[in-house]
Structure formats: structure tokens, C-alpha cells
């Protein structure tokens, strides 16, 4: 349990929703709608944190100014940076070379936002003070960003441009905050399992003595290694972070990036208790667009209220060696299944409707190297593609597991059966003959593990989608994919 004011849930901009929010001009959210979205998350849903994704052409870098000028009374009573929070997601220059200099713009926006806040509210609360960096695999990335900010953003205020002239701070004004928080987002198996070492080196380098947040992905690990492997990797990573927390004696609050689809975490308003018991040591859960817009608002508000009033606990104790062996087996089989399914996935994903006006982040696909250069869409469209064909992606890879493996999984993943039942209701067995025979074993294995009921309305639609897809009658595919998503209450 942390003594610092760190949100229990964070509203994000992940485009996994099928329904459009009431404040959006159309089904594709972008531009000014995202300003309204942030205010809606704070004021209506009572989320205490909003992710602001700073990548892509449609991003508004003047979000703080617009929020304060449009809703001054609200933010006067609930101070951004003290009572509620906004987390900036900036590009990682080590990986995203084309977006590298955007990181510098993001860092420069932090003192600018401070000046706006000070002018409006006449105090020293910094509305922005933390950035998250994706695809972290080394402490050097985090150290570079923290040091760049201290030396070249806030640090430049002491510099004189002309010998004997005034310092920049006298000409431009002081730069606050003088330092920022940098939160790593770990997305690969190697990075997640090595996160404790990376975080320890970073906190030692920066002499951090209060807290350091850590973000673990859930969607991209599922895309790379399979849903079950992603869950187990997360459990090991969280146990290791907890041990580090005890060792260094500072708070290391964990965030997990979960979505509504079972493949992406099964974190929906009607299932938060299962997720919290599955990841008890997590401090912050992401509430993505399907969570917010594909359920009745009263249900969403109640879920956010319950999250806000819950406390984090110790992680689930796991036998790391046993789980690592299972992860290797299931991920290897998953990648074999994906390799033969990739052509179908790529073809059908073109017809999955978009929900955001933004450039997609690049993805890390482990099997692009390991399985002969397979290329896939990002996690949301990937998930939507397979569900739309009546093949829940959660089942892939399961054929590799023995009864003993399943027993070990159930001992640490209490809601494994429930999550599997949630996904298998969208299975269309009539479509199986159109899939490569090699994936049938994974499907049969999953079906043998739990009792489940098929959603007949969804099955009918996936039959129509498959028929149109096979006959290349593609005009109706986006509409039917959307109809099926309405039944599931998530796009992908």
C-alpha cells in the first residue's frame, strides 16, 4: 500500500471501444474530442488520472491550457497535479527514431504547462510532472530522459546567451518543475522479467527516495506470447518488483495496461474484482475506451468508485521456475498457431473499423524474428480480427499444456477458467473447418478444460462474416464486425 496519492485507475485513449461516447462528433475520436474525453473521465467517471498520448499527428499539445480555460471552476476545486493527474506518454527515441524529437517537445511542454497553471491558479502546483516511456529495455533510456530534463529543460535557466548578460531565467522566466518522474513501460518478456534490475539501477542513478512507478503491458505480451503466457509473465514480474520494493525501502507502485477483451486482460466494469484478486499488488489499472463507453455509465461509475476505494495488497506468490517452463511451452505453440493464421488475420483486420484519429505506435513482435518474419496488426485489430471470425485468440497455444501444467496455472491464476469461459462463448465451431488444421488442437484443448455456453447471436454474425470474407464480399464486413463487437462490448 502506497502512502502517496497515486491513482487506482487511469483513463486511457486505447481504441478498443465499439460504441462512440456521447461527446464525440462521430465514431472516430480525435482532436477536440480528446479534450472533452479527459474532462469526462475526471468529472463524470471520477477517474483520478488520464493518460495523454503524445504520439501521432492528431495529438493536441495544448491540452492543459484548453482544460483550464474551458473548465476553470472544476480545476480550481480539483487541482491537476495534486488531486487528479495527467500522465504523458512520450516516444522512446531508442526505438522510435522517426518520433525521437517529439520527446523533446513533450519535455518542453511541462514547464509551459506549469506557467499556465500558475497564471490561472496563482500557486506552485505543477499540473504535469511525469512521463511514461514505452518499450523500455534498459535503465539508460530512463536516465537519459531524467537527465535531459534536468540539464536542458529546467537546467538551461541558469545559462547566459551573451557573455556577461542576464541568465535565461531573467529573460524567459524560471522553469518548473526542476525535475520530473519517468515511468518505464515494459512490453517484452525479457524486459518485464528484467524490470526489477532496470528499475533498481534507475532509482540508484537518480537517488530516488520517495516512489517510482512501474508500468507492465498486458496487450502486446499477449500478442507476442499468447494470453496465458502474458498473464504468467506479469505475475512473475510483479513478484520480482515486490521483492525489490522490500529491498530498497521505497514504494514501487505498479500499473498494468489491461483491456476489456479476455485476450487483453478481461478488465471490464463487470469483472474488476476478479482482476484485482488476480493482480492484487497492482496500484493502477488502465480503464480503456471499451471499459468507459461500451457499458452503461452507471455501471462504469460504480466500477471506478469501487476501484478508487480499494487498496493494493501483496502479489500472488508464484513458483517462477515452474511458470517459466509453462510460458516457454505455451508461447512456442502460440507462435506456431499464429504463423499459420497470419494471412487470414492480416486480410480481415483491414475491415476492422478505426476508433481514433492517430498514428499507431510501432509494435514489438517477438515472433517477427523467431517465426520467419510474421507481420501482424496491432493488438486491438488483431483481437478484433480473430473474434470476428469466431476464433477467440485466448485458446491459441493451449494445446502444448499437460494436465499438470493446467493444475499449476490454476493454482496461481484463480480465474483462468472464468476468463476462458468468457472467451469461448464467442467460439464458432462451424467456422473451424476454414482454419488451418494445426490450430484445431489448441481449440479442442481449450474446449475440454471448461464448460461454456455459446452466444448464438454472435455465432450467427461470425458465420456471416466468414462467408463474406471467404467469398470476398467485403462491403458488409465492417458493419458486421461492428455488430459482433456490440454483442461482446468491445471491439478488440
Image: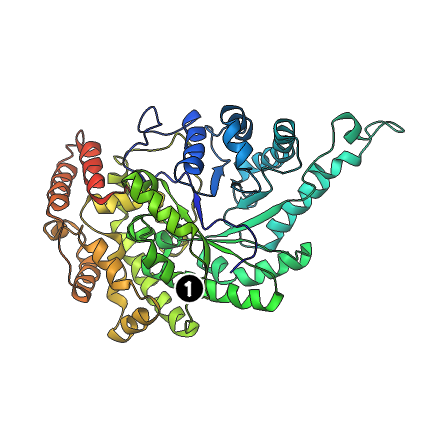
At a point 62% along the width and 38% down the height, the residue shown is 126
Picture coordinates of residue 47, whole percent (x, y): 43, 42
Quarter of the rendering containing residue 20? top left
Secondary structure at numbered mark 1:
helix
Q: Residue furthest bottom?
A: 404
Picture coordinates of residue 289, whole percent (x, y): 35, 40
Where, quadrant-wise, is the C terminus in this rendering? top left
Q: Is residue 206 left or right of residue 299?
A: right
Q: Nearer the viewer, residue 125 or 226?
A: 125
Q: Is residue 166 visible?
A: yes
Q: Is residue 438 left or right of residue 355?
A: left
Q: Is residue 406 left or right of residue 246?
A: left
Q: Which residue is mark 1?
A: 235
Quarter of the rendering containing residue 148? top right
Q: Nearer the viewer, residue 333 or 237?
A: 237
At a point 37% along the width and 30% down the height, the residue shown is 29
Q: Residues within 10 Å of mark 1 (few under 14, many from 20)?
A: many
At a point 71% along the width and 35% down the height, the residue shown is 175
Work out whether 193 lies above or below 375: below
Q: Is residue 376 visible?
A: no
Picture coordinates of residue 268, whole percent (x, y): 31, 49
Amino acid at each position: 500500500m502506497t502512502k502517496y496519492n497515486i491513482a487506482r485507475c487511469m483513463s486511457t485513449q486505447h481504441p478498443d471501444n465499439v460504441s462512440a461516447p456521447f461527446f464525440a462528433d462521430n465514431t472516430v475520436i480525435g482532436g477536440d474530442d480528446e479534450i472533452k474525453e479527459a474532462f469526462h473521465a475526471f468529472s463524470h467517471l471520477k477517474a483520478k488520472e488520464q493518460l495523454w498520448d503524445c504520439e501521432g499527428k492528431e495529438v493536441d499539445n495544448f491540452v492543459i491550457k484548453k482544460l483550464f480555460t474551458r473548465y476553470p471552476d472544476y480545476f480550481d476545486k480539483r487541482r491537476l497535479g495534486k488531486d487528479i493527474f495527467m500522465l504523458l506518454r512520450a516516444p522512446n527515441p531508442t526505438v522510435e527514431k522517426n518520433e525521437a524529437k517529439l520527446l523533446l517537445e513533450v519535455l518542453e511542454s511541462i514547464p509551459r504547462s506549469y506557467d499556465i497553471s500558475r497564471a490561472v491558479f496563482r500557486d506552485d502546483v505543477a499540473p504535469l510532472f511525469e512521463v511514461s516511456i514505452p518499450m523500455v529495455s534498459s535503465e539508460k533510456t530512463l536516465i537519459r530522459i531524467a537527465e535531459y530534463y534536468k540539464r536542458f529543460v529546467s537546467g538551461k535557466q541558469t545559462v547566459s546567451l551573451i557573455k556577461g548578460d542576464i541568465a535565461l531565467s531573467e529573460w524567459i522566466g524560471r522553469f518548473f518543475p526542476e525535475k520530473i518522474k519517468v515511468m518505464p513501460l515494459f512490453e517484452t518478456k525479457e524486459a518485464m522479467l528484467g524490470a526489477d534490475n532496470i528499475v533498481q539501477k534507475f532509482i540508484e542513478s537518480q537517488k530516488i527516495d520517495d516512489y517510482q512507478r512501474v508500468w507492465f503491458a498486458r496487450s502486446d505480451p499477449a500478442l507476442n506470447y499468447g494470453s496465458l503466457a502474458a498473464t504468467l509473465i506479469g505475475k512473475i514480474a510483479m513478484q520480482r518488483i515486490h521483492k525489490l520494493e522490500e529491498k530498497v525501502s521505497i514504494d514501487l507502485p505498479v500499473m498494468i495496461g489491461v483491456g476489456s477483451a479476455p485476450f487483453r486482460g478481461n478488465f471490464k466494469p463487470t469483472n474488476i474484482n476478479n482482476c484485482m484478486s488476480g493482480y492484487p499488488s497492482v496500484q493502477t489499472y488502465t480503464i480503456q475506451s471499451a471499459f468507459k463507453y461500451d457499458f452503461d455509465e452507471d455501471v462504469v461509475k460504480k466500477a471506478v468508485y469501487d476501484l478508487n476505494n480499494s487498496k493494493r495488497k501483496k502479489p500472488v506468490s508464484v513458483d517462477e521456475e515452474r511458470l517459466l517452463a509453462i510460458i516457454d511451452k505455451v508461447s512456442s505453440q502460440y507462435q506456431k498457431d499464429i504463423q499459420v493464421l497470419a494471412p487470414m488475420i492480416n486480410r480481415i483486420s483491414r475491415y476492422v473499423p478505426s476508433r481514433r484519429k492517430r498514428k499507431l505506435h510501432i509494435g514489438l513482435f517477438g515472433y517477427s524474428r523467431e517465426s520467419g518474419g510474421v507481420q501482424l496488426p496491432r493488438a486491438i485489430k488483431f483481437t478484433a480480427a480473430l473474434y470476428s471470425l469466431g476464433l477467440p485468440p485466448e485458446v491459441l497455444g493451449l494445446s502444448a499444456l499437460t494436465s499438470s501444467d493446467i493444475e499449476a496455472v490454476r493454482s496461481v491464476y484463480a480465474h483462468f477458467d472464468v476468463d476462458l469461459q468468457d472467451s469461448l462463448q464467442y467460439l464458432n465451431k462451424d467456422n473451424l473447418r476454414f482454419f488451418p488444421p494445426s490450430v484445431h488442437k489448441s481449440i479442442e484443448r481449450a474446449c475440454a478444460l471448461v464448460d461454456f455456453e455459446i452466444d448464438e447471436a454472435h455465432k450467427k454474425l461470425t458465420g456471416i462474416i466468414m462467408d463474406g470474407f471467404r467469398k470476398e464480399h467485403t462491403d458488409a464486413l465492417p458493419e458486421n464486425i461492428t455488430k459482433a463487437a456490440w454483442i461482446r462490448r468491445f471491439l478488440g
